[in-house]
Amino acid sequence: MKTETAPAVPQVRREVRPTAGKKSAGLLGGVSHLMLVLWTILTVTPIVYTFLNSFKTNTEIFGDSPLALPRQWGWGAWGRAWETSRIGEYLVNTVIVVAFSTFFTMLLGSMAAYVLSRYDFRGNRLIYTLFVAGLSIPPFLALSALYKVVDNVGLLGTHTGVVLVYVAYSLPFTVFFLAAFFKTLPTTVAEAAMMDGCGHARTFFQIMLPMARPGLISITIFNVIGQWNQYLLPIALLPGDKQDKWLITQGIANISTSAGYEADWAGLFAALSMAIIPILIVYVIFQRQIQTGLTAGVGK
Amino acid sequence: MRRGRLTPGAVRKWGFIVSFLAVPLAIYIIFFVSPNLQALQLALTNSRGISPDFQYVGLENFTRLFGDDVFWAAVRHHGLILLVMPLVTIAIALFFAFLLNLGGGQKNGQLSGVWGSSFYKVVFFFPQVLAVVIVGVLFQAVLNPQKSGILNSVLGWFGVDPVGWLIKPDLALWTIIGVMVWQGVGFYVVLFSAGMAGVPKEIFEAAALDGANRLTLFFKITLPLVWNTVQVGWVYLGIAAFDAFALVQVLSIDRGGPDNATTVLPLEIFRQTFTYYRFGYASAMGVALVFLVLTFAALTLRVTRRERIEY
């Protein structure tokens, strides 16, 4: 009995299931495509309107049809924003700070990670734990104390102070990630180099660093984006009277408050566009690396 | 004996270790470890500003904190954000990740994502690279309470009267949560997509061949297989729920308003530090925040550990 009925069951299955599947697939397919398109619109609209509003007049922006296209396309607001909002200056400041802080984060972070992952010595575990413990501490605990420390060493309101603090705050994750990465690399190449008389430091810079390239790229991207978008530390460490030192996030926040007083809304949107466009360009070019770089942190 | 250990090789090795660790460790200790330790000390003082004169007041800051309505409002807000934001973000992200990786149905017996999936991934992820400050200013225009607000203008087509998204105290925090979801979804779509790509496609294809429809495919097969990634995402979003500083500061009315309806602990810490210069009190608040974050992390770890035993 059993041997006779058994083959019959799959046959029935094969006839019924696919049609049911197709029907629901058609409906689900339609709904799901609609959802994807909706979310695309949700994502893109605020950004597109920032660009469009930078070409409008105040009456157009606050009129009855805010979704209409600008009546005249002029770069007036862009010129005003460039001159009065100092957005160019903030961009240059941010490029300088992030270039230095990311470079030193990567250099010092990979040095520490390499020694901690590859050398056995007394205190290794303690130092590693000290670095990794920093991952679970939110930056707000030390806000007052950090302000005091940076003031005590005379670096308040300087880019040097910001760079040093960025490096310190980026080290826990960088060391954690790179130490794990160095551990996955084979030991034989480095050992062979040492046998041939290559020193410790030279082995690191000429052999291990090139081998660690994929990990280094991911964490560099992670740090560049994190430090570029940092807001708390600049507003804490670069006070209001040092406006010539300000970074882009701080400048944007300030422009949004002052636009209310000056009622130059198109100027605000133009300034905002200037802050978004460089990121958009970099993102479009490097989107694959950026996606892997940013998600690499969570994957571990 | 001891001298014997100091061979030239050992000296070189120790010199190398010290020279590589000294600078990173020094910067880390001066600008990260020491401020955090000093914060624990400051929390027990009445320190105001950078003045070196202050007295130890024991746990006075903490007793004051527990009687502070704004503190409790902020804690409640973190609770709501923690309950809603990770769940909604993960649900939407899982849905999209599934569609983009496996939702396209079978083509020649192979499962694929819906048409245009790489385009969607690129677009959805973009808000993640924008600074939270920029997102905040963008949404000021989107959520403008007048008819000229972009969202209100769209709702107007359907006959909905303008909504005061950030003005109504009951609504403002939900609006902030909505913006957090808006920014976060794309990141988790990409993260979960990576998780789904890591699962052998044969498993999905075998199930699809057996006639499993997409709902079964999602709930019975995909979700259990990427559950680890979902848990990691939950921890990250949970920690983000204790931040929200930049968004609330830039987007909300009166920085945490209306009437403290959206305030969060980091914002109060910032205010106590840089508006009132109450460094001692701000540090006590910081200690409370760390306590909350670590409690959340410990609870999550415990729950996930228990689940691991069950499996």
Image: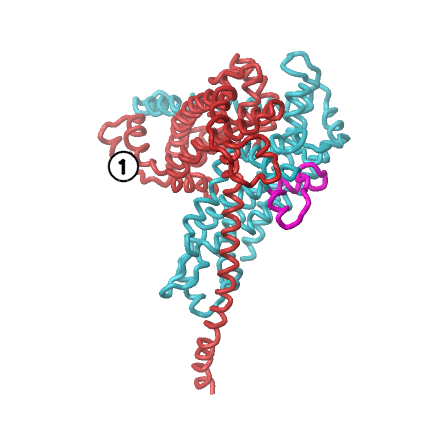
Residue at the image point whose x is 49% and y is 33% from the top: A72
Which range is magenta?
A: B151-177
Q: Position of residue A57 (x, y in %)?
A: 55, 30
Marked residue chain, label 1: A
Q: Secondary structure at mark 1?
A: helix
Give the amino acid type for the residue marked by disc 1 in the picture. Val
| Foreground pick, B130 / A159 | B130
Q: Is residue B280 left or right of residue A153?
A: right
Quarter of the image that includes the C terminus of chain A: top left
Q: Is residue A83 above or below residue A192?
A: above
Q: Is residue B218 left or right of residue A192?
A: right
Query: Which residue of the protein is positioned furthest toward the front in this rendering?
Result: A71
| Foreground pick, A281 / B42 | A281
| Foreground pick, B105 / B156 | B156
Q: Is residue A109 above or below residue B148?
A: above
Residue at the image point whose x is 51% and y is 19% from the top: A84
Quadrant assignment, res B274: top right
The chain shown in cyan is which?
Answer: B
Residue at the image point whose x is 44% and y is 33% from the top: A279
Characterize the local packing of mark 1: few (<14), some (14-19) or many (20 or more) Cα atoms within 10 angstroms.
Answer: some
Q: Position of residue A253 (x, y in %)?
A: 57, 27
| Foreground pick, B284 / A102 | A102
Q: Is residue B168 left or right of residue B148?
A: right
> Can you identify the residue that label 1 sits on?
A189
Q: Is residue B157 magenta?
A: yes
Q: Position of residue B270 (x, y in %)?
A: 63, 25
Q: Is residue B222 magenta?
A: no
Q: Colour of chain A?
A: red
Query: Which residue of the protein is positioned furthest toward the right in this rendering?
Result: B67
Q: Is residue A241 left or right of residue B6?
A: right
